[in-house]
Amino acid sequence: MNKCYMHDLTWQEFNEKKNGVIILPVGSTEQHSFHLPLSTDSTIAEKISEKLADRINGVIMPTLVYGYKSKPLSGGGPLFPGTIDLNGETLIRLAYDILEELCRDGVKKIFVNNAHFENEAFLLEAIDLVSRKYPDVKILESNWWDVLSQDIIDKVFDEIPFPGWALEHAAVTETSLMMYLAPGSVRTDLLPEEKGVTPIPYHKYPIVKGMVPDSGALASAKGSSAKKGKLITDAAVDEFVKIIRENFGE
Ligand SMILES: [Zn+2]
């Protein structure tokens, strides 16, 4: 049992902790190439939330393990078995209902930790709608990649050039994070020899086979390591703590 996980608490224990920061990890169930599990985004969101909760004595809600559809050039698209996507409207309503329930319970400080690139607009829509109804509740939303400094990015991409966050799917950062946060889940012998795709400045529907490499990776994972995963995790958690102290005065 871990006392920072909401689902391990009784209602009375939760009630005692509800004045602190409540963390909602959000991920996806999505293909992450040959070498990473479908849970990759959800595992990263949850494990980073665990380290954050330790630092701020926060409570982690059950992870939202489904997310919005990936596009072919930012996550690989829906053509891979095991990718279970939500429609945008579903995600907005799901996040809205969860956040509103917290507000009704008297929670005042919420941190949404998103680890799936495509979720953000829909999460922000839910947050905005809840916020209009409960203006005394402060809700923050962030993710591990936007808070990284150029210095950290340079250290992580010491072997290959940084391809941009949209293409960093199942590539160096996520592979390194999983090597550090969930080492047993990385199939290191199956790392694809992916050179990466070239982004195009438009979207094309319907999405058909061939728009994404067969591996499902959009950029190379060459040079991934648990050490880099720890570097990213520590930097992101430090930034999250800073953001929380600035905004919640924790
Ligand atoms: Zn991912």
Image: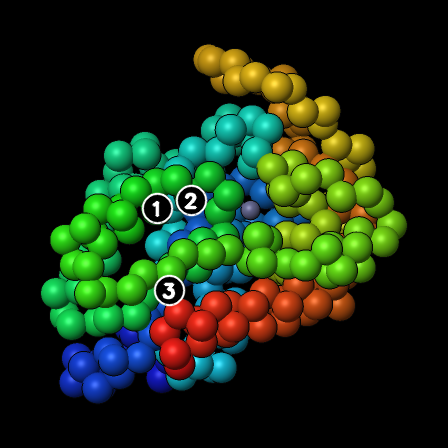
In which image quadrant can residue 109 be found?
Answer: bottom left
Residue positioned 59% across, 43% down in the render: 32
Position of 195 with respect to 202 (left or right) is right
Amino acid on which disc 1 is placed: Leu
Q: Can residue 127 be seen from the camera position used here?
A: yes
**Of label 3 and label 2, which has the lower sequence position?**
3
Position of 59 with respect to 40 (left or right) is left
In which image quadrant can residue 234 be found?
Answer: bottom right
Residue at numbered disc 2: 120
* Badge 1 element: helix
Q: How far apart are marks 2 and 1 (CA)?
A: 6 Å
Residue positioned 27% across, 48% down in the render: 128
Q: Which of 27 and 156 is in front in this view?
A: 156
Q: Distance between the residues labelled 3 and 2?
A: 13 Å
Amino acid on which disc 2 is placed: Glu
Residue at numbered disc 3: 111
Tag 2 near tag 1, CB within 8 Å: yes
